[in-house]
Image (spheres, rainbow, N blue to C red):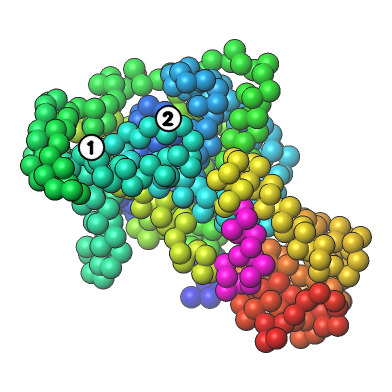
Amino acid sequence: MTNSAIQAHLPKIGFAGLTENWRADIISGLLVFLIALPLCLGIAMASGFPPQAGVITAIVGGLFVSRINGSFVTITGPAAGLIVVILDSVQALGGGDAMAGYHYTLAAIVCASVIQTLMGLMKAGKMSAFFPSSAVHGMLAAIGIIIMAKQVHVMLGVKPDAGTLFETISAIPASIRDMNPEVATIGCIGLLILIAWQTVGNRYLKMIPAPLIVVAVGMVLGQYFDLDHEHLYLFLPDTQFLPHHEFTIGPKFLVSIPQNFLASFAFPDFSLVGHAVFWQQVITICLVGSLESLLSAAAVDKLDHYKRTSDLNRDLAAVGLGNVICGLIGGMPMIAEIVRSSANVNNGARTGWANFFHGLFLLIFVALFPRVVHEIPLAALAALLVFTGFRLASPSQFKKTLEIGWDQLGVFVITIVGVLATDLLIGVAIGIFAEFVIHFGRAVNWSAIFKIYRKVEETEPGVFRVEISGAAFFGNYLLLKDELSKIPPGKKIVIDLSNTALIDHTVMENLHHFCEDYEKTGGHAEIQGLDGHVATSAHPLAPRKRVGENGFRSASN
């Protein structure tokens, strides 16, 4: 179907869209709910929050944010990418008191969300274009490594004696040696199911969410091992590697939530608002949450069958308002979550009402069936998170980055190491600095790295020519993005890069996405003038430098 044909058959929005598309959206909302429930519980617990906090967030995201946001098929809720941020806040603000840290972090979420809302109102949705792609992907990979390092112990039923991240990682062999066999059986089977489900080709089986299967199997095994009642059991093998040992089993390995949903609410404590550490957490929550939400919403737009483009500024403001509510009543911050959103699209969702129904089903379930939630083993949820962490930091991510160029792999790895050694903000700053150093080495002169010269003119009716010269890199791309956004939709755009001395990967990627998005409006956009440049690799979005400039070798050299 052509772009114009797609545009002519766009689903209605608002209550008209509900009347027109309720069947498709309610089915998709139900299926997404089945995926979301275990993930919401697991993400909250991994973040140092009570498990119901994740469900509260998804409910607010579905029932409230879906009605005011600027996207169409995104699902808003807690995400694995925020685990590290929130857990760090709980530990930093609580000073060893987890419950106090929880209430202080709720206050930090409220303050961060007010800033996030103001950012959306001030049209800061474009800020994601500033951050270099490899540094962002490095941040996400580092988050994946941290999630795996922490959750593998839960999956094995062991609590390591570790205070730092590197101690937690180094304790993994000991946890494997000392694992609780029954708990580990639940966790490992859940992980094997997730891995095996990737190879299933039957489209009817694929309609069953893998997280639902993991939770269902885990609950059956939990009943078999009698996790509801605390007791001891003996593990009989007595060898060098599997010594004879006595293990404890019981309700502490199950999810614990209030039986009355209204008792799930908690309230923020603003007593640390005058301390610097509090505002450090506020800034981290705001920036990381905003960046992840914007990137996810933009990615989901590319999956939308109707080729619609989200209003990222409105989306950021709506998510900010939703997060204010979450912070006030005991929930986690939310983002536009890409995994659940992808499932939403694949399940046939047409409008934001699918997000609404997913939140409604969550509310009904936790309000009426809290006992069922209590029967979910923590090891099953940990398996979901270990698998999620692996997908963020899988070897394929390293391979994809290497295909773009060794320089991008360098920034990617430096960012990972920086995040693991320090924290998210400092780690990303280290990655950005590394990218700057690379560009300083490549630039024609040092002043060129801070400037981008662009000229936009309508050469003939309906045809716009964008001429770019100087150095085009992530640090100055926002200036070019502003110029491109002023061009009316439905025209022809020619982006001429023949006079650019340098084009980095982030700009190449953003220009490529701009052309794709502009095509959705019924217009045409193309990039010209790259014949006189050499690239770091054969990748179509690799960094490029004009032939004859110093300090740059082509992929063929």
In percent of width and height, residue 520 lies at 60, 67
Work out whether residue 380 can be spotted: no
In the rendered image, the vertical position of residue 199 relative to residue 187, given as above or below: below
In percent of width and height, residue 63 lies at 43, 35
Q: Residue shown at 59%/40% (left/top)?
A: 423
Between 290 and 65, the one nearer to me in the picture = 290
Of callouts 1 and 2, the N-terminal one: 2
Q: Is mark 2 on a helix, strand or loop?
A: loop
Q: Residue shown at 35%/38% (left/top)?
A: 42
Amino acid of disc 2? Gly
The answer to whether residue 260 is magenta is no
Dot 1, how many residues are within 10 Å of its Cα: few (below 14), some (14-19), or many (20+)?
A: many
- Mark number, residue 9: none
Residue at the spot of label 2: 48
In percent of width and height, residue 220 lies at 13, 42
Predominant secondary structure, magenta span: helix
In percent of width and height, residue 428 lies at 65, 48
In the rendered image, the vertical position of residue 444 relative to residue 428, given as above or below: below
Amino acid of disc 1? Pro
Q: Give the range drawn in magenta.
A: 401-415
Residue at the spot of label 1: 377
Q: Residue shown at 37%/27% (left/top)?
A: 50
Q: Which residue lies furthest to the front in this view?
A: 240
Q: In this view, does 452 lie to the left or right of 267?
A: right
Q: Is residue 252 left or right of residue 398?
A: left
Measured in 3D between alpha carbons, the distance from the residue under mark 1 to the one under mark 2, in whole angstroms, is: 17 Å
Q: Is residue 4 left or right of residue 456?
A: left
Work out whether residue 135 can be spotted: yes
Q: Residue shown at 32%/33% (left/top)?
A: 159
